[in-house]
Structures are given as C-alpha cells and as structure tokens.
Amino acid sequence: GARERGAKKCVDRFSPEYRQRRERNNIAVRKSRDKAKRRNQEMQQKLLELSAENEKLHKKIEQLTRDLSGLRHFFKQLPAASFLQPGSAGSDCR
C-alpha cells in the first residue's frame, strides 16, 4: 500500500539499530550544545576585552582633546607673527 505524506514509520524502539541511532544522535546533540556553549563563552570574553579597550580609547580621546584645547589656548595667547621664523614673514612655505 501507498503511504500518506507525514505518516510515521513503525519503529522498534528496542532494536539495536534504533538504539545505535539514538545514541549517535544524543552524542551529536551534546557535542553541538557544548560547541554553542563554548562559542557563547568566547563571545562573552571578547565582549569584555573589547569593552575594556573601548573605555581605554575613550579616555585617550578625552586626554587628547584636553591637550588640543590647551595647545589652542596657548597659541591664541601668542602674538600672530611669533609662529613665523625670522625672515619668512612674506615667503610661501610650499
């Protein structure tokens, strides 16, 4: 007779072949879950490392911004011609 679509096969749950398939499947599932767990832990570790690096870089940006602001303030206090080397007031530096 023809089988209908989606009909389940009669499976002998006590046959050695069935037990062997189930055991292989259980091993594969365990391996897959362990791999996913490891990948998740690695991602969490990477997240912590990148967050720390990001914080460090933000602090460096803040420090460099303060330095730049201080230098701008310093150069604004100088007379305009004091940046130029003597004798180069009218020459082009290109």
Image (spheres, rainbow, N blue to C red):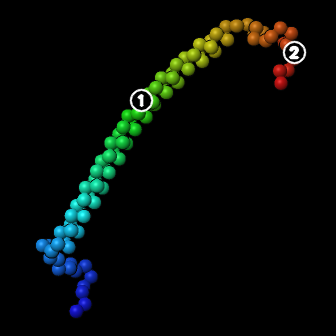
| Pair 1/2: label in front | 1
The residue depicted at 24 percent of the width and 87 percent of the height is 3
Amino acid type of the residue tagged 2 in the rendering? Gly
Q: How many marks?
A: 2
Q: Residue under circle 2?
A: 90
Vertical placement of 36 versus 14: above or below? above
Question: x, y (%) of residue 74?
Answer: 64, 10
At horizontal 79% and vertical 12% (from top left) the residue drawn is: 84
In front of the other: 22 or 8: 22
Residue indicated by mark 1: 52
Residue 91 position within the rendered picture, expressed as x and y whole percent measured from the top left: 87, 17
**Structural distance between the alpha carbons of marks 1 and 2:** 50 Å
- Classify residue 7 as left or right of residue 44: left
Residue at (45% x, 30% y) in the render: 53
User: Which residue is nearer to you in this view: 73 or 65?
Assistant: 65
- For this orientation, the residue located farthest to the left is 14
Under mark 1, the amino acid is Ala
Dot 2 falls on a residue whose secondary structure is loop
In the image, residue 24 sits, relative to residue 7, either above or below, namely above
Image quarter where the C terminus lies is top right
Q: Nearer the viewer, residue 93 or 22?
A: 22
Q: Quadrant of residue 17?
A: bottom left
20 vs 38: above or below: below
User: Tag 2 or tag 1, which sits nearer the N-term?
Assistant: 1
Quadrant, the N terminus: bottom left
Q: Position of residue 16 (x, y in %)?
A: 17, 72
Bin the neighbour count of mark 1 within 10 Å (Cα to Cα): few under 14, some 14-19, many 20 and up. Answer: few
